[in-house]
Amino acid sequence: MSDLIWFNGKIIPQEQATTHVLSHAIHYGSSVFEGVRAYETPNGPAIFRLQDHTKRLFDSAKIYRMQIPYTADEINEACKAAVRENGLKNAYLRPFAFLGNVGLGVNPKSHKADVAVAAMEWGTYLGDGALEAGVDACVSSWNRLAPNTMPTAAKAGGNYLSSQLISGEAKRNGYVEGIALDVNGYLSEGAGENLFIVKNGVIYTPPTTAAILPGLTRDTMMYLAKKAGFEVREESISREALYLADEFFMTGTAAEVTPVRSVDQIEIGTGKRGEITEQLQQAYFDLVKGQTEDENGWLTLINE
Ligand code: PMP
């Protein structure tokens, strides 16, 4: 962890950014957050898809009627400042909003959130070598959230109890990550990643109706795959289609583009990073590191 954090409008030392133990978020999971990355580019450190992450933060807050007392521009500036003030070149950012000391009733007395942005160094999320060698995953015994129970399109703290069950079970059983099915038995997502399979040169990913967080890396990947000439289909994927895929990879801001070489000890394709996965992974890193043209204005330089 780096030392400084943006907290309710000011950059302060992290140890001073404290909250009450009776904060609503601690008891009831009432927080919303983002995971964002900045990469070193030829023009200096740049935050990838900052505006889209901030938009999703506000969307998550909207679903829970949580009020963020800052504008999107102010949050964007806070993110840039958090990277800059900590002297980081590559960074993982954690903007978040939570209900603080607003009473212990489940229905909060105030919907006004406290807001913070942390920035830190964070290497490969799923372990050293994961991006080249691929990881071993399992299908979780836990399903992802059912529709109209807890909204998976909101990136809310409480949703990550589900993710903890999925990833904890996987790790205890010796796997790097767990993959959840939705309540209908179709593929949903990993504990913190979206899923893609490649079959006969076509790229498939579960639709937003499969209880997923609509990931920004997922969106970026669909864009890059289409740009490279691949057909991309958002459709329901069965568990067995995963075992029989030619290639399988997971995407997420933290996980980036991680190949999966086996699921439930069944080798996927050749049991190594697939060719199409490697091609798209390269396209992703070239984009986020400013090595290819930023056609969509997705890079925000922290010094501008
Ligand atoms: N699903 C879940 C449950 C996640 O936590 C994440 C990581 N934020 C993702 C998918 C991928 O989302 P993104 O690509 O926007 O990071």
Image (spheres, rainbow, N blue to C red):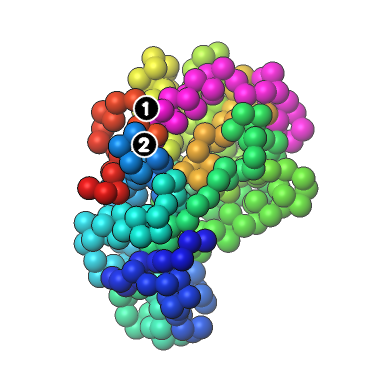
Lateral position of residue 286 relative to residue 122, left or right: left
- Rendered position, 176 above or below 246: below
Name the residue carrying label 1.
291
Name the residue: 54% across, 22% down: 278
Q: Position of residue 53 (x, y in %)?
A: 34, 49
Q: Position of residue 258 (x, y in %)?
A: 57, 34
Name the residue carrying label 2.
41
Label 2: few (<14), some or many (≥20) within 10 Å? some
- Rendered position, 137 above or below 116: above
Residue 44: give its label.
none
Name the residue: 50% across, 52% down: 121
Residue 272 is covered by the magenta coloring: yes
Name the residue: 68% across, 43% down: 176
Quick check: is the Cβ at mark 1 less than 8 Å away from ligand 1? no
Residue 286 is covered by the magenta coloring: yes
Q: Secondary structure at mark 2?
A: strand
Amino acid type of the residue tagged 1 in the rendering? Gln
The foreground one among 188 and 253 is 253
Q: Which residues are magenta?
A: 262-288
The foreground one among 256 and 190 is 256
For marks 1 and 2 on the same chain, the one whose residue lies earlier in the sequence = 2
Labels 1 & 2 near each other (Cβ < 8 A):
yes
Label 1: few (<14), some or many (≥20) within 10 Å? few
